[in-house]
Amino acid sequence: MNDRKTILFAEDTIHIAKLLKFKLEKEGFNLIHYPSGVGVTEGVLKNKPDLVLLDIMMPVKDGLTVLKELKSAPEIAHIPVVLLTANSHEEYVVKGLQLGAIDYILKPFASAELVLRIKNILKMR
Amino acid sequence: MFLIIDIDIFTFLALTIFALLILTYILVIQVVLLRLYHGFQTKQQQNFFAEWEGKFFNYLEGNENPAALIKKIGRRKYLYLLRYLREFFLMLKGEDFQKLSSLINDTKLQPFLLSQLKSGAPKKINEAAYFLGLAKSTASIKLLRKKLKSPNASVFLSSALALARLNDSEAVFDILRSARRFKFVSKDSLLAILSEYSDDVCAPLLQNLKREKNVLIQSITITLFRHFKFYQAGETVLKIMVYSQTKEVIIESIKYFAGIEFYEALTALRTLINNPKAEIRTEVLKALAVLGDASFEQRIWDRMYDSEYEVQYNAVITLLKLIPGSEEKISKFAYSDLKDRAAAIARMVLSERSIRN
Amino acid sequence: MEIIKYIVFGFNSLILLYFLAVCSIYITLNIIAFFKMIHYNRTVKYLDLKRVFKLSNYKPISVIVPAYNEANGIVESIKSLLQLEYPDFQLVVVNDGSTDNTLQKIFENFSIRQVSFTPFYKLKSQPIRSVFMSSEYPNLIVIDKENGGKADAINAGINLAKSPLITVIDADSVLERDCLLKIVRPFMEDENVIAVGGTIRIANGCQILHGNIMEVALAKSWLARFQVVEYLRAFLFGRNGFDVLNGILIISGAFSCFSRDALIQIDGYREGCIGEDMEIIVRMHRKLRKDNPKLRITFIPDPVCWTEAPETFKVLRSQRMRWQKGTVDSILLHKKLFMNPAYGWIGLLVFPYFALFEMLGPVIEIFGYFFFFTSFMLGFVTISFAVAFLTTAVLYGVVLSVLSVILEELSFQRYPKLSQLLTLIVAAFLENFGYRQLNTWWRFRAMIEYFSGKRHWGQMEKKGFAK
């Protein structure tokens, strides 16, 4: 059994995306990266990752729109979604949790904390 | 034989225009060269990023000595490195951030940046100040304070931002007072900069507020208190609000009270709800949604007949938030008179609420 | 014979002076606007706009989108508008009696329910049939009304909008995500601001995905390229230069923001007007600034709104003729402002400038060319004069066009590739050898049509929102 878990993440800042990829791959995860909200829902349907990490403020299609789509597709609605956001705007965070996100992480973030949270969430499944 | 050519005004005009044309094309060449240079620099930068990335990620993970890592890079590439690190400074905190700042503060990068800061060129100063602030390099505070006095507006702004990030409370007052030197430094820019401070800047600000006469500084200070949720300023701000003649100061005070839930302000609000300025009435209504109680009900109802749309709108919203069971009363009112504007506003608010459910 | 010679010489000199003046004024405006740009860029650099929002007095905005027969693009437009970054805004879509299935498309995609609504204000507009809101997107409101044209639709939107700031956009404008954050800033910094215009850039050739600009590029057609240069020299760096005198007389309807109170005070947009976007600004100056000269109308230089420009002669011609008629309309309607010191710089400088150079300009130029060539043929003109004339009429324009491209390069640098910059330089040169003159000719024809009575919309055009 292949117990390498897959994480699909959408983040438009390239540097951060690369950092996340590096850190999470080191922890033993497979990473699939999308530079914006476009194509994420299709990607999740196709790859059925174990967790989805979404940046909220992305060009063209933002994280909340994608989240809505993910939670309304029955085959993938069970996949945990963590929101990563630079907004300390409570409105976006609350909205995200209402839409079904399981957790959120604010930027600036500590990568060690992010990794731990992700691991915890995946352990719970 | 004349050696001087006899030029009439028309030939002169034509020649001037030709000259302008040539001048313009010289500018074109300059601009193109500038582009090419930037393109070259960008390419260099990209190459550097690609090369450096792996080393950097490993450094974040491991225990490598930052100074040793920096030694491997030539001084000419320092700026590329800093620009690469910029995003990370803004996005990371905790241990990652410590490692990042170490990369600047414990290596040759710091003296490099300090020397840039000492130079005369605004561009260099601004960039250096920016990174020193991001990295929280306390060694740069003295120099930055000096740069605050600069007549150049962008230098002032970048030093102020750096000092705010460095949490240098001594500089707060210099920043507030110097801003008046520059016409275009707006309240927004000052707030953006000052909100980078951590909340221990509030105590000295409060001390100052007690004797502050300048309304702009009063207004900014009170806004910051709201941002930092600094409860201790309650009484002082209340005193100021009651005696102030400036609309902005009053509005910021009301917002502050709502933000920290300072109920002692209610008595003052009881009067302010009828203030001649519509923006103040609006703000009071918004605050009452948080602070008010049933004793305000009649006063708020009266505001529904206000002459200003904004006031009426907020009166309805506040009633719905504040008084339980008011929805029925408002509903009745909303459909009682189809032509009345207050009723129309009430109808709209009720529609919005019902559609959300 | 001598007298005739002198008269001819006199006329020709006046015409020469005119060409000299037109171009010189534009060059001055370009340079003024450029310095404003630099100043603006410097201030915006240090601001994290979203963060400051919470701290400052940012007001809610109602974005009004008049729509007529936009079934093809309306759903995508609305979807991308709903994603605009602004914590407190309302989207008001006004269906102006479309004859296609615009309304149907909206119903299908946004969980629409009918609500009962009465307008808060009484601006003139055709009757509203019904009002709808979305249960999924609480800030979306859709108005269905009888057809009445763009100005009419906007008025209906204003009557029902709930925010103190009203932003008006075209349904097919492509907006950048933070456009609302940017356009609201002048209102924040100065409470005397009553209207702000956004700067329009040409979208032709750009890569657009779901209503977002993915990549800025130049169109392949030279006509579009000429228009890019034209927008830079005439609008961005041109008329906006008048901002220093608080003298902006026109802001684009594709993206502009107003204080609602100001709009209500002047009774909203004028119906049946051809150039409603200019007319309303002129009227604001006339009615509001006389008693309160401190009020300001300004613009933001950020390229936040992109629009598709015509790429065929036919469509371009009808657009330019319509613009000219609109200008004439607005100027004649408010001729009271002409040389009227009660209106400060607007009355004494800007309005006369528009009247003489923008309105009468094409007539003077066409007449000028004609007169010059005839007198040249008849031998009344010296070689040196002829050279001076042609240089001023054509080459001086090249200086202006190339200058504006350079200024764009030094301020915004929106075209990332060097090849694009070079193409623009070439376009700047070429546009003066035919394109500009063609424009003048069209505008001249528009003047003739206007004054011979064909000033109103034809049957087809009245119903739609032409640009």
Image: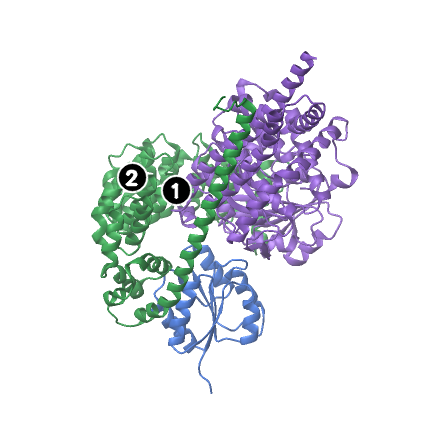
Chain colours: A blue, B green, C purple
- In the picture, measured across the screen, residue B290 lies left or right of residue C113, that is left
Residue C63 horizontal/vertical position (percent): 57, 45
Can residue C272 be seen here? no
Residue B49 horizontal/vertical position (percent): 38, 64
What residue is shown at x 34% (from left), y 38% (from top)? B219
What residue is shown at x 46% (from left), y 40% (from top)? C37
In what quadrant of the picture does the C terminus of chain B appear? bottom right
Q: The residue under label 2 is which amino acid type?
A: Leu
How packed mark 2 is, by other alpha carbons closer than 10 Å (few <14, some 14-19, many 20 or more), is some
Q: Which mark is residue C118?
A: none
- Mark 2 lies on a secondary structure that is helix
Q: Nearer the viewer, residue C64 or B11?
A: B11
- Mark 1 lies on a secondary structure that is helix
- State the image quarter where residue C22 is shown: top right
Number of disc labels: 2
Residue B197 horizontal/vertical position (percent): 29, 49
Q: Nearer the viewer, residue B226 or A54?
A: A54
**Residue hosting label 1:** B188
Query: In the figure, A60 relative to A47: above or below?
Result: above
